[in-house]
Every structure is written in C-alpha cells, then in structure tokens.
Amino acid sequence: ADPDFYTSNYRKIYQATEEPTGKDLWVQQQRAAHLVKILNATLPQAPSRSLDVGASTGVLLKTFQNAFGCAVTGVEPGDAYRSYAEGQGIPMFPSLEALTASKADKFSLVSLIHVLEHLPDPVGTVASIRRDLLDKDGYLLLEVPNFYAHDSYELAHLACYTPHTLQEVLRKAGFEPVVVNRHGVPRSALLNLYITVVARPLAGDTLKSQARPESLVALRRQAGLYYRRLVQRLFPHQAWLPLAQGKDD
C-alpha cells in the first residue's frame, strides 16, 4: 500500500475530510466494546502491553487501557488521526518500520482491526509482527470485512477474506487461530458483515508453506449475498442498525 495515500488521501476519499468524524468515532467505540468482550472470553489473562496497528483515533487503545489497565502504543499513517490519538495521550508511530526502529519492548497483544485487507503482503506483515513485536505467549487480534456478506469492493482493499482464507493467512504466518467470530457489530444484528479472529503464535520458527484452497467460493458468495438481500427485505431495521442519534450520516 502506498504510504502517501494513507497519510493524506484515504480519509478524504471515504469521508470528505482527513479529520475524525462523529460517525467514525461512534463506530470505533461500539467496535472496541465488542472486541473487549471477545478478549475477556478468550484470553487467559489481561494483556500488559497492547499495540494497535492502524490505530486510527486511538479509541480501541483507550478502551483496552480502561478495560485491562495495560500500557498502549499505536501505529497510524494518517496524520490527522495520529495527531488526534496523540492528543489522547497515546504514544503513536507513523509506521511499523518506525516502531521497530525504536526498539520497543514486545507486546502481549497486537491488534489489526480492518487493516489486513489494505496490505499488499498480509502474510509477510503478520509474520514480521510475530517475529519482531509479539511476545511468544502473546495474542493477535484481527478483524476484516467478510467477503461472503459484502456486496461491493472498496477502492483501498487489496484483498477480500472469508473465514477460511483469513485462517490460512494466519497459519502461513505462524499462528494458530483460537477464536473465529462472524458478526455484524456495530452495523447489523443479523448479517455477518465482519470476521474477528484471536490467534496465538505457533511454537518454533517453521511457517506453513502451503495454503489449503477453499472450494465453492463463487457459490458461497452467491448464497451469502442472496441471504443478505433476503434479510434486508424481511427485517430492514435489524439488518441495518441506525447510527446513534446525533451522529453524522
């Protein structure tokens, strides 16, 4: 992905401004609360040091800090969003390279929330996080859009993921998925719009060389989109939950 694109153009294309919006902050708050619930049900103990890659405004890190009492660090290429997070007292870096160069201590939790789909080399990036940034007993938290529930492709998304392909990326990068959760939080009560995975690093340095191909992808996507259209027609208010009152459209 082009760093300059995410520094100054990405947000402007999607929301007409580089500054955080009320809608964006609300979505991040709801998403963060849901992720805390998943981690509380999964992790054997609270993380002591948390890194969020693609940290945006720092809402997720602030939520982790309040929920777990952990030290937090963020990576965010967007200048305006990084400045906002720094204004919340969160240590921030513009890139993974800058963070690695700082020789920071390793983290017990690393999160990439709606980030993996933007990366040109997801396996390489996740493998480098395992090698350079994550404690051997730490956990990785990922969330991506579900290819079987989204009916459009986004300009900035370089890859689309299903539950199967997301787990294969993790296995190739040396991780074992612990929890795979399909859900619609915060936008839908009925549609599995997103995939959230908690994973832990496999022992040893040998990465899986071959991925298992997924079968019937076109048919599964067609079925998923048919279900989406049916649910939207029958239960429109549950299929798409409104944004909180007073937030931006």
Image: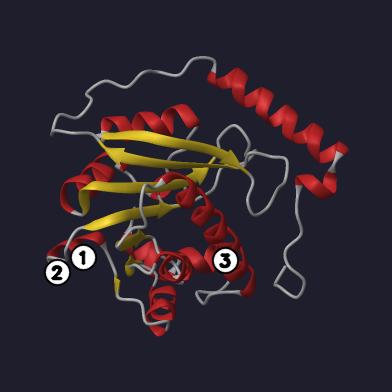
- Contact? badges 2 and 1 (CB < 8 Å): yes
Give the crowd class for mark 3: few <14, some 14-19, many >=20 residues within 10 Å: some
Name the residue tied to disc 1: 99
Q: Earlier in the sequence, mark 3 or mark 2?
A: 3
Name the residue tied to disc 3: 29
From the viewer's side, name the closer residue of 52 and 160.
Answer: 52
Mark 2 vs mark 1, CA separation in Å: 5 Å
Look at 47% across and 63% down and name the residue there: 10
Can residue 46 be seen from the camera position used here?
Answer: yes
Q: Position of residue 77 (x, y in %)?
A: 35, 67
Name the residue tied to disc 2: 102
Q: Secondary structure at mark 3?
A: helix
From the viewer's side, name the closer residue of 190 and 45.
Answer: 45
Q: Earlier in the sequence, mark 1 or mark 3?
A: 3
Q: Secondary structure at mark 2?
A: loop
The three-letter code of the residue at mark 3 reads Gln
Tell me the quadrant of the picture where the C terminus can be found: bottom right
The three-letter code of the residue at mark 1 reads Leu
Q: Position of residue 137 (x, y in %)?
A: 23, 46
